[in-house]
């Protein structure tokens, strides 16, 4: 089993990520049926670049972005060395695919997915490398059927890698996508993993591919079940209010956003995950017993969605 990746391995990861971006965009364009992705290629002054793909004002998707980036350079940003002090003084490469989909219909959840690879090297020392990623779901008018399906696909993607893997990364997702200043989860979770190198390069790369490939299988059936559900302006307003929580998490807590901005990444691409319309209301609270209150009271607290599911 190969424990340390070489240049050919790094190139294979990049090829996979670019292919994943292509396949996800094709699937989402077909699901939307009206709008297509517009590609914006960019270069980073310090080294590297990427291609951002944006879809807007579609029959399904109000705004979505699927970005690929591969950036490299010398010297790590503070957000990285604070988390991993052994990275100081190393050159680095970071590559990944990250996406967020914001449907227009409040009954169709927002979804997020990300898979990434990082390697830092310096002469005379072994490279420091890891994989990370996952996917998570942010519903506004949640159903148990959708939550169970989402987590069932997540569990199936993890199953070949060990019985405990889904539970470990499900818990990490619940803890990571959490707004500490609100004492509230961002959504109903999914999977989150980072710093993964314990299985050796080949097995870790295989796991990252399993998670990246599972996103479409997890999301498209939910889209098809909910896209024709009628919605009201009041429900749209609640969606926009909850989108405010999404913005707060990305700008206050998300490590990827911070790394991208501090490493000189392209701001427009880093912030493409933000929703097109959003609102905040001072101390706004849903009516007790309403569907809006049920989201917060019943769906957002961490749950074992598969406890009674085979």
Image: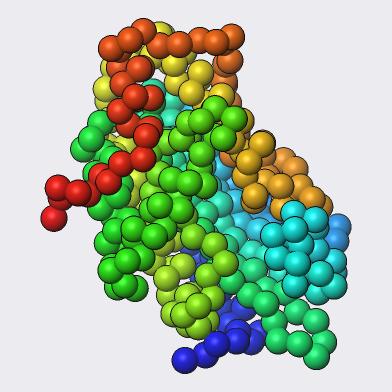
Instruction: Determine the residue positioned at 75% across, 67% down.
Output: 85
Instruction: Determine the residue positioned at 46% across, 53% down.
Output: 172
The correct choice, above or below, for 302 with respect to 128 in the image is: above
Left or right relative to 67: residue 242: left
Left or right relative to 236: residue 224: left
Left or right relative to 88: residue 9: left
Residue 158 % position (x, y): 33, 65
Residue 233 % position (x, y): 41, 9
| Image quadrant in which you'd find residue 195 | bottom right
Instruction: Determine the residue positioned at 45% across, 21% down.
Output: 239
Left or right relative to 106: residue 21: right
The correct choice, above or below, for 109 with respect to 95 in the image is: above
For the C terminus, the quadrant is bottom left
Residue 84 visible, this angle: yes
Q: How many numbered badges does the structure rendering display?
A: 0
Residue 203 % position (x, y): 44, 80
The correct choice, above or below, for 127 with respect to 139 in the image is: below
In this rendered view, identify the residue nearer to me: 50 or 309: 309
Instruction: Determine the residue positioned at 48% across, 31% down.
Output: 184
The correct choice, above or below, for 24 with respect to 209 in the image is: above
Residue 137 % position (x, y): 40, 41
Residue 136 visible, this angle: no
**Image color mode:** rainbow
């Amino acid at each position: 089993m190969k424990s340390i990746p070489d240049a050919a391995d790094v190139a294979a990861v990049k090829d996979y990520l670019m292919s994943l971006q292509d396949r996800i965009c094709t699937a989402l364009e077909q699901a939307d049926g009206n709008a297509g992705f517009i590609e914006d290629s960019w270069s980073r002054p310090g080294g590297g670049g990427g291609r951002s793909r944006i879809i807007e004002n579609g029959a399904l998707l109000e705004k979505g972005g699927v970005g690929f980036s591969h950036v490299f350079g010398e010297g790590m940003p503070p957000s990285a060395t604070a988390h991993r002090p052994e990275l100081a003084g190393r050159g680095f490469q970071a590559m990944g695919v990250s996406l967020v989909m914001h449907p227009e219909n409040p009954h169709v959840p927002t979804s997020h997915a990300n898979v990434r690879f990082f390697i830092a090297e310096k002469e005379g020392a072994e490279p420091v490398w890891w994989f990370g990623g996952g996917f998570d779901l942010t519903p506004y008018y949640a159903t148990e059927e959708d939550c169970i399906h989402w987590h069932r696909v997540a569990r199936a993607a993890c199953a070949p890698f060990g019985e405990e893997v889904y539970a470990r990364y499900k818990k990490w997702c619940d803890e990571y996508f959490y707004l500490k200043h609100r004492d509230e989860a961002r959504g109903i979770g999914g999977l989150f993993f980072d710093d993964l190198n314990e299985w050796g390069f080949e097995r870790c790369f295989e796991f990252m591919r399993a998670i990246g490939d599972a996103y479409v299988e997890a999301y498209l059936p939910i889209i098809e079940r909910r896209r024709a559900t009628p919605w009201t302006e009041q429900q749209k307003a609640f969606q926009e209010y909850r989108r405010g929580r999404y913005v707060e998490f990305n700008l206050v807590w998300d490590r990827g956003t911070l790394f991208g901005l501090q490493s000189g990444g392209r701001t427009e691409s880093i912030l493409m995950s933000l929703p097109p319309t959003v609102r905040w209301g001072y101390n706004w609270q849903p009516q007790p017993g309403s569907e809006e209150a049920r989201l917060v009271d019943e769906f957002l607290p961490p749950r074992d969605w598969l406890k009674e599911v085979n």
